[in-house]
Image: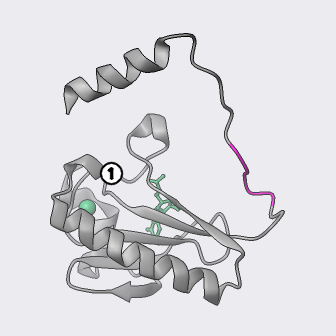
């Protein structure tokens, strides 16, 4: 997705309205239009990057700092018991808008949204190989 067609770039430039909760030089945060819980907020860098690993460290750092602050404030304002911070990257991971963003999702005990994802166990020796394969790429 190019910047011109990007819905979040349009929100950042003011072409599309949003319910803004926070703004600084590098970051805009606004309510998600299709919330999974009341107060579900998106934290978006003002520069267009598609995925988390595309972000320069200054952008990631600004996003992270803003997200920490916003998460606490949103949770308090919504009287939440907790919150999730999610970042979907790629279609397989559920990313619909190709402008990197953190979801801040306020949570209440037994809100029924989701709990744990399914898990499995590595076979003998598999974890060692997997970790090595990842380290090789660093
Ligand atoms: P993703 O699936 O890419 O991680 O999440 C994109 C999010 O952006 C979705 O939760 C969706 O509801 C939200 N969204 C999409 N278009 C708009 C919009 O025009 N305004 C706002 N406020 N949120 C949007
Ligand atoms: Zn964009």
Pick whichever, 62 or 51, lies toward us.
Answer: 62
Residue located farthest toward the right when viewing the structure as drawn: 110
Residue assigned mark 1: 98
Quadrant where the C terminus sits is top left
Q: Residue at x 54, y 70 (%)?
A: 33
* Among the 4 quarters of the image, the one containing residue 111: bottom right
Residue 16 in sight from this viewpoint: no
Q: Which residue is drawn at 32% across and 51% down?
A: 98
Tell me how many marks there are: 1
Indicate left or right for 124 with 15 as reference.
right
Image position, residue 2 (x, y; %) = 19, 52
Position above or below: 77 against 15: below
Residue located farthest toward the top when viewing the structure as drawn: 124
Image position, residue 100 (x, y; %) = 32, 57
Pick whichever, 76 or 5, lies toward us.
Answer: 76
Indicate left or right for 80 with 6 as reference.
right
Position above or below: 110 against 121: below
Q: Residue at x 84, y 63 (%)?
A: 110
Image position, residue 112 (x, y; %) = 81, 57
For ligand 2, give the image quadrant: bottom left
Residue 30 in sight from this viewpoint: yes
Q: Which residue is drawn at 39% across and 45% down?
A: 89
* Among the 4 quarters of the image, the one containing residue 60: bottom left
* Among the 4 quarters of the image, the one containing residue 124: top right
Position above or below: 31 against 5: below
Mark 1 C-beta to ligand 2 under 8 Å = yes
Dominant secondary structure of the magenta stretch?
loop
Q: Is mark 1 on a helix, strand or loop?
A: loop
Image position, residue 97 (x, y; %) = 38, 54
Q: Give the range drawn in magenta.
A: 112-116
């Amino acid at each position: 997705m190019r910047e011109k067609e990007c819905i979040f770039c349009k929100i950042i430039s003011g072409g599309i309205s949003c319910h803004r909760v926070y703004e600084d030089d590098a970051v805009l945060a606004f309510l998600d239009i299709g919330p999974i819980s009341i107060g579900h907020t998106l934290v978006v860098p003002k520069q267009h990057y598609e995925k988390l690993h595309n972000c320069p460290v200054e952008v990631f750092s600004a996003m992270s700092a803003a997200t920490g602050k916003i998460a606490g404030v949103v949770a308090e304002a919504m009287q939440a018991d907790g919150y999730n911070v999610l970042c979907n990257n790629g279609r397989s991971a559920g990313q619909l808008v190709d402008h990197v963003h953190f979801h801040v999702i306020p949570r209440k005990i037994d809100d029924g949204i989701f709990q744990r994802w399914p898990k499995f166990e590595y076979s003998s020796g598999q974890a060692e190989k997997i970790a090595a394969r990842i380290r090789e790429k660093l």
